[in-house]
Image (cartoon, rainbow, N blue to C red):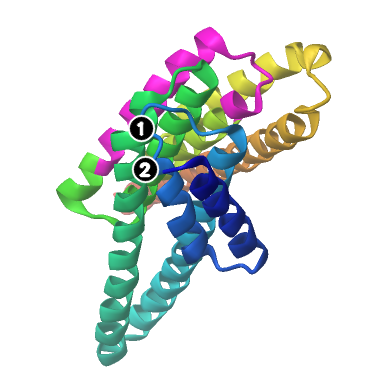
Amino acid sequence: MSSSSREENVYMAKLAEQAERYEEMVEFMEKVAKSVDNEELTVEERNLLSVAYKNVIGARRASWRIISSIEQKEESKGNEDHVAIIKDYRGKIEAELSKICDGILNVLEAHLIPSASPAESKVFYLKMKGDYHRYLAEFKAGNERKDAAESTLVAYKSAQDIATAELAPTHPIRLGLALNFSVFYYEILNSPDRACSLAKQAFDEAIAELDTLGEESYKDSTLIMQLLRDNLTLWTSDMTVSLLTQYRFIALFALSLTSLWLIGRSRR
């Protein structure tokens, strides 16, 4: 692709973003990404690619959550005819989700990750790879879900290794990786302890070096730190409620056993 064609596609992607035509934004940025095999995308270009896909996938993820919620309500009511219709519709959304994820994962693996040289670019693309495998794991089932979760873990771990060695704890890409990695542990692997540990470590390490944070990334970094703290507050609250529920159950069980023992003694 000539430099003029590349610039034109980038400009068209910006226009599409302003018009909120994100599918077309994806098309323009894919052309750019696939044309620069031995060359890095600029920071602006990779951000445009990320924004395009984030909006396209975000709309479908929101749709899937809404439809899944309606499906659960209809199942609880025993409306089998409605449930069958909803399952078909959910399948259509899942097919779209799969196509979108497969599209960006192909671009990442075939073009962007192999040509990434600076640590920042490598972490950015590996994090992105982990994100889209995670989105697959959100709705896949059985072995497909297991495979998606394993691929997510591998990508995030690879990104984490590079980020820990090469990027400052306050770097927004490193913080964003920690945020998404912890969400993966909490939502996909159902491991709240690991999620909280990862999020807390990232937050604490960033706080310790907050005075070194440059003005250009201050807003992004502090926003992600706030999200990490919000998640920690929510997750630890959920864990406390869960523990209280377990203790309450144990107490009630012990009380019932005591009652049975007392009844037994009174009958002797």
Q: Position of residue 127 (x, y in %)?
A: 45, 32
Q: Secondary structure at mark 2?
A: helix
Residue in view at x 37 percent, y 77 percent: 71
As for residue 150 lying within the magenta part, the answer is: yes
- Is there CB contact under 8 Å for labels 2 and 1? yes
Q: Nearer the viewer, residue 32 or 211?
A: 32
Q: Residues within 10 Å of mark 1 (few under 14, many from 20)?
A: some
Quarter of the image that includes the N terminus: top left
Q: Which residue is mark 1?
A: 37
Q: Residue 169, can we see it?
A: yes
Q: Nearer the viewer, residue 44 or 86?
A: 44
Distance between the alpha carbons at the discs numbered 2 and 1: 7 Å
Q: Nearer the viewer, residue 221 or 8?
A: 8
Check the image and report above or below for 15 versus 123: below
Residue in view at x 25 percent, y 87 percent: 80
Q: Which residue is mark 2?
A: 34
Q: Residue 133, can we see it?
A: no
